[in-house]
Structures are given as structure tokens and as C-alpha cells.
């Protein structure tokens, strides 16, 4: 049997939350070990331009920002590892975790920063322009600024879709909202807000057939009415998808309290504590409201400080 590795602080996941937790934990001499996860750097690695993170006066690309955060964590001797945690057992005082190649780690503290993954429609054309950073986005608050004075399309029917459509309406000349069913899933107050916004056009019972582009960026969306089967092209330079996120929390569900959509619940509001002593959460795995790099980084700091205090109370 392979040897069990014992660590003081294990950080699972690597976006702004994980790396910030690592910086704080390393500076507190907790010798953190960080597993980068399935998507090293997290969701920000799919973001072309980050202009709203304080300190970057000229903006920064998502991948560059993650490389800088990783380098900063390593500067304080964080053990950053490629790979992911595939299984955990949080039943006892020792938090047992296994990597994808079955290496067993026993951690005194664990910081979960596995994030959430945006849901997309799954169209090849959508994925093409998403990957090249050419006009497809799942975050209007992050990327809407780049489309000011232009026409955009947003897909979704819930509260967050309405909120993002309204946000875009303040920047864009026209926003076309595509709703698959014949009504919103959003609360009445949110639905009324978009219905009463002059430059938002709502198309009910409408599916996206294809995201259209010229090879460099998005130029429009081909849509179909699901009742009449009529197809039409809507010109746009930005195509936003607001159909929800999946928190990456499946491996924790037998031990950690999750809400009905899979987000980790804070055991104590205002802290990063979960229901399991010694296990903390940071970033989008617990945040379905803000989902910004800066808020994720803030909770990463909180998780490291909470973990440090937990270890101090144990006399470590």
C-alpha cells in the first residue's frame, strides 16, 4: 500500500479563491498543498480580458492573471500540483482525500475552492467563439462593458438572466432576450423589469440554432420559434448565455451540506466554515450571487484565516 501523505492545509481548486487562500496560508506557515483541479486557473482562464479587478489599471487577460496568482502563491512556497482530488472522506477528525491516481492525503484542514462551471447550450458554433474569446460569454457583469453601444443577445429565463439582460440594456443599444418556453422562470418583479425596459426585446418559445460569426467574432444568432418553426437571424456582436451554473461539489455531497442546487452552505454566516470542522469553502462553490474574481479572492483570504485559527485552537 502506498504511503499516506499528511498535510496541514489542503486546497482543492485553483481559481482566485484557491490561490488567494494559498498565499495567506503559506504566509502563515501552514505549508499548503494546492491541487489545481480539472481546469487550472478556473473559469477566468476562459475570460479574454479582465478589467474590473483592482490594481490592473490597463486590464489583464484571465490566463495571465491566473499565472501571476500562481507565481505569487509559489513565491511563498505553496506546493502547487497538477491534478485533482477525486474522492474525500470527512467522517472523522482527519480529513481524508484521494487524488485521481489514488494517492491518499490526510489533511488537518481543507479549503474547498472548486468553483462552478457555467452551463452552455453546447452548440459547436457557441463553443468555437467562446474558446477564441470572440463574443460568447456567460457573464454579462464581467464582459458587458466590451459591447457598449452594440447589439447583444442573451439566452435565459430565470432571475439572473433578467438581471444580466437589464445590466446589458444600460450599455447596449439593443438587447434581444431568448426564452425557450412561453414564459419566464424569473420572479414577477424581475420579469416585469425587463418587460418594461425599452431596448430589451423578448422572444418567447425561441431556441438558438447557431451562433453566427465571421471567423473573428460573433455577428449574429440564428434562432427558431419552437411553435411556428420560423427561423430568423438576429444581428449581434455579443452572445450571452445565462442558463445557470453547476457548482463543482459532487465529491463532497455525502459529507458537506449543500443547497438544492449543489452550492455549499456556510455553517456560520460571515465565515468560510462548512458543517464539517476543519473544512472551509471559498469562491464560487458557495457563491451563486456575485461570482466575481474579487469576491472569490476575498473569501479565499477568509478561508485561510479561518483555517489558521482552527489549527491554532487545536494547538498546531
Image: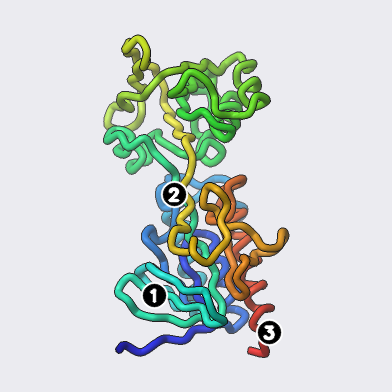
Q: Sort mark 3 into few (<14), some (14-19) or many (20+) by Cα contacts within 10 Å.
A: few
Query: Between tags 2 and 1, which lies in front?
Result: 1
Dot label at residue 59: none
Dot label at residue 98: 1
How far apart are the two marked residues, 2 and 3, measured between alpha carbons? 34 Å
Whole-percent x, y for residue 166 in the image? 60, 27
| Residue in the picture at 64% in, 20% down | 192
Quick one: SS at disc 2?
strand
- Point out the image quarter for the N terminus: bottom left
| Residue in the picture at 58% in, 56% down | 296
Query: Between tags 1 and 3, which lies in front?
Result: 1
Dot label at residue 312: 3
Q: Sort mark 1 into few (<14), some (14-19) or many (20+) by Cα contacts within 10 Å.
A: some
Is mark 2 in CB contact (under 8 Å) with mark 3?
Answer: no
Quick one: SS at disc 3?
helix
Task: Write down the residue under mark 2.
Answer: 117
Amino acid at each position: 500500500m502506498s504511503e499516506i501523505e499528511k498535510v496541514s492545509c489542503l486546497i482543492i481548486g485553483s481559481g482566485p479563491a484557491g490561490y488567494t487562500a494559498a498565499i495567506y496560508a503559506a504566509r502563515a506557515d501552514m505549508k499548503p498543498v494546492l491541487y489545481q483541479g480539472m481546469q487550472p486557473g478556473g473559469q477566468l482562464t476562459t475570460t479574454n480580458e479582465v478589467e474590473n479587478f483592482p490594481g490592473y489599471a490597463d486590464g489583464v487577460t484571465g490566463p495571465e492573471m491566473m499565472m501571476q496568482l500562481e507565481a505569487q502563491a509559489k513565491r511563498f512556497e505553496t506546493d502547487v500540483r497538477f491534478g485533482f482530488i477525486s474522492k474525500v472522506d470527512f467522517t472523522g477528525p482527519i480529513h481524508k482525500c484521494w487524488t485521481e491516481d489514488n494517492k491518499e492525503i490526510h489533511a488537518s484542514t481543507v479549503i474547498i475552492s472548486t468553483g462552478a462551471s457555467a452551463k452552455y447550450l453546447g452548440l459547436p458554433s457557441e463553443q468555437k467563439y467562446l474558446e477564441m474569446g470572440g463574443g460568447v460569454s456567460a457573464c454579462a457583469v464581467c464582459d458587458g462593458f466590451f459591447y457598449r453601444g452594440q447589439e447583444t443577445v442573451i439566452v435565459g429565463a430565470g432571475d439572473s438572466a433578467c438581471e444580466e439582460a437589464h445590466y446589458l440594456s444600460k450599455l447596449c443599444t439593443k438587447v434581444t432576450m431568448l426564452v425557450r418556453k412561453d414564459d419566464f422562470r424569473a420572479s414577477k418583479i424581475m420579469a416585469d423589469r425587463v418587460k418594461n425596459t425599452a431596448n430589451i426585446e423578448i422572444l418567447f418559445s425561441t431556441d438558438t440554432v447557431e451562433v453566427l460569426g465571421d471567423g473573428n467574432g460573433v455577428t449574429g444568432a440564428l434562432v427558431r420559434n419552437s411553435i411556428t418553426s420560423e427561423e430568423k437571424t438576429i444581428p449581434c456582436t455579443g452572445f450571452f448565455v445565462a442558463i445557470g451554473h453547476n457548482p463543482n461539489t459532487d465529491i463532497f455531497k455525502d459529507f458537506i451540506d449543500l443547497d438544492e442546487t449543489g452550492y455549499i452552505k456556510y455553517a456560520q454566516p460571515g465565515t468560510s466554515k462548512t458543517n464539517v470542522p476543519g473544512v472551509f469553502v471559498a469562491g464560487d462553490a458557495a457563491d451563486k450571487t456575485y461570482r466575481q474574481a474579487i469576491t472569490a479572492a476575498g473569501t479565499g483570504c477568509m478561508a485561510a484565516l479561518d483555517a489558521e485559527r482552527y489549527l491554532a485552537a487545536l494547538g498546531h
